[in-house]
Amino acid sequence: MVMNIVLLLFLISTASLNMLIPSYSTIIDEFAISESVIYLPDSLSVLVTAFVMVLWGYYTDKIDRNKVINWGAILSVFGFVFTALCTNFLQLLIARIITGAGMGFAIPVAISVLSDIVLPEERSGLFGFLAIFSSVSNGIGQGLSAFLGPLNIFGFGWQITPLILSFLALIAVFQLLFVNLPDVGAKEESLANIHEFEEVGYEYKINQRQLVKLIQKPTNKFLILNGFFSIIPGTIIIFSLITTFSREMLYVLPENIRTQVSTLMAGVASFGYIIGSIVLSWYGDLLYKKNRKNRARLAFISNIIAIPLCILMIFELKPISLENMPVYPDPIPTEEITKFILLTVSAIFQNYPNYIFYMIFSFFGTFFSAGMVINKNAVMVDVNLPEHRGTASSFFQLTEQVGKSVTLMLTSFLLSIVITYQRLLYISLIFWIPSALLWLLTVKAITKDIDEKNRILRERQQMTLIDYIFEINIEIDRAIQIVHDAKNKIVKEPQNALKMIDKAILHLTRITENASRQKIADLESHSQNLLDRAKLFRDNLKELLELQKFEDLPYLYQLIDETWEKSDFGKIEVLYESGYLKVVEARLHRYYNPIECIEILQDAISIFDKVIRLASDRVVEEGIKRLTKDEEELQQRIHNLIILAQKSKSNTEVLKDKLNSIIHSLLREDLTMKQLQSVIALTSEYGLKLEDIIEESFDKRILRRFQRAMNQINNLFRAYDEWQTRE
């Protein structure tokens, strides 16, 4: 169900981008506009989609993906309806901008969700399928416009296509009410153990600091830049091939079949792309199992091969003569249009053998061009963390869509220079050369980036499972505390004590079931033992109450006191110490990587916050019950720990903010972030202090300012110690 909805939205998005192309001539006549501005609505739509896509992609990783999809789908419905009802060119511009803003969510969300459905070794196949689906969707958008538009259904000509797409978008919105999207990172091998635990989720979200790291990752940088160059030939071929046929190669055909025949002849080129997507996606997955570089290698090789083949494809395009075509009535009756379209296509291939070679070269040219597309998205998923994929995809799409938009905007200008569409197609292929070079750089960088991602995921898996087991231990500890609270009510309030024991039993039952389901044998055994003892104690208490043997109630009090373990509050105290150790770790890192210090301090703040929450759960409100001496001491410990954690959290937040301010002041005045990160890389590689490297690499003025900044940082940590010891 999830797959169907995502694919439906993907279809709508792709179809909407190209749906006006076959109707350009009709729109020019209907709105009485110049041919030079006809690309502007689609160009603006693509440009808005590109920039809004980054926002959609970021919030796909930041918040609930269901909400992002719903907001985008509803906005796109409004854009489609507005497109269908517009009565002038200005309204069409606005409608296409709104549609672009709405549909900008579809691709990043689709890639993020689908990457959590398929296994890593099957991702080329997934994106191969998406490439085919995109091509089919593009064909659907253009086909609806080319074939339904001229029929003027219900008085709607070219406007019928956006109406159909708005209806499909409404269906998707309705279906989203009844589905849940898959967990983030659900198919990551490095997170396999986490997903075996039903109550443990991958809770990491992207933030602005991670956004910078995402863009700076070598593979991402190369592929983001690659998107601009690689999209230009495809854009010009998609948007201009039909026009090349209708305006130059097939111009002699009757007007009421020219667009349809041109669309069919241009559509021949998409056949190889579809087959290439199937074959090369399968081959990419096969190669990936042997070497993780192979997807990038396959894309590089495919890129190189596609260039000469597409040049030969364009070379075979020749104008036709009406003498070699069927005899057409004037006008062609509506009921015979399909017949004459088929007769015309047949005559073209019979009388112009060059179009047979056009088919061959277009098949193999577009076959290999598919290798770049399907492997690009698979590589993106391979190197990026699960919570980064929507954002990474949006950046990839940004450069592609900017390239596409700029290309469309400049098409009229380029045509005025090169004169013909055919020459324009030749020129577009030049941009695949830098694309190939960027793929070569990607081959060299990809292994390191994949290893780094897997290392981070393994560390997160370990920490998440440790936290989960720790939380179960805390829950067991809470149940033990409830039993001890019940103990103090046995003599004076035995009925209330019975209720509290029942509460402890429910608590322990849930814990035992969770531990059993997640196959945590030690915790299951421990909680089951406590559950059995709690049930036995409840039965004994019930029996004494039924027999009214109140004189024996102190015996049960003593039994709990002697046989039940005490509440282990020490676990939370240990957690607090781990937070303080994080601050110590940040102090040690200040000489080598002050930027990383900020991240470490944020971890400490999170730990202190967790201590406050866990300790607060154990506070007994004043007046609720009379505490024993031991219980009073425990409550005092809890109270002191909460105060200490709150103080440490507050002081650490101040320390982090001031440290961040010092670093940004230094960067703003003396060093760029890139320079500082290069220096930090050397500290990691050679174990040198930052000051030593800056002394060797920069002038004395920068060294003095850096030393002044380091003195400020040292003073900050000394002040932190004073804050901590201050009453």
Image (cartoon, rainbow, N blue to C red):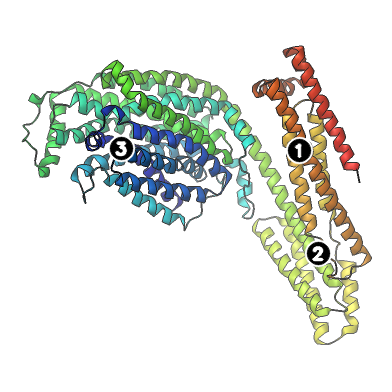
Tags 1 and 2 in contact by the CB under 8 Å rule? Answer: no
Q: From the image, tell me which residue sits under label 1.
A: 601
Which residue corresponds to mark 3? 89
Residue beneath label 2, please?
Answer: 480
Name the foreground residue: 514 vs 525: 514
How far apart in space, not on screen, are marks 2 and 3 (Cα)?
73 Å
Image location of residue 601, percent across then percent down: 76, 38
In the rendering, at what x and y percent does residue 401 appear?
A: 43, 31
> In this rendering, is residue 481 above or below 705?
below
Amino acid type assigned to the residue bearing label 2 in the image: Ile
Mark 1: amino acid = Leu
How far apart are labels 1 and 3 at the CA level? Answer: 55 Å
- Judge left or right: residue 572 versus residue 551: left
Q: Cβ–Cβ below 8 Å for labels 2 and 3? A: no
Check disc 3 and give the amino acid type: Phe
Q: Earlier in the sequence, mark 2 or mark 3?
A: 3
Q: Which of pointers 1 and 2 lies earlier in the amino acid sequence?
A: 2
Q: Nearer the viewer, mark 1 or mark 3?
A: 3
Query: Residue placed at 69% from the left, 64% from the top?
Result: 510
Place residue 143 in its image quadrant: top left
Which badge, 1 or 3, is on the more N-terminal residue?
A: 3
| Residue 13 horizontal/vertical position (percent) | 39, 42
In this view, 429 is above or below 539: above
Measured Cα–Cα span from mark 1 to mark 2: 34 Å
> Is 65 in front, or is 96?
96
Residue 313 horizontal/vertical position (percent)? 28, 22
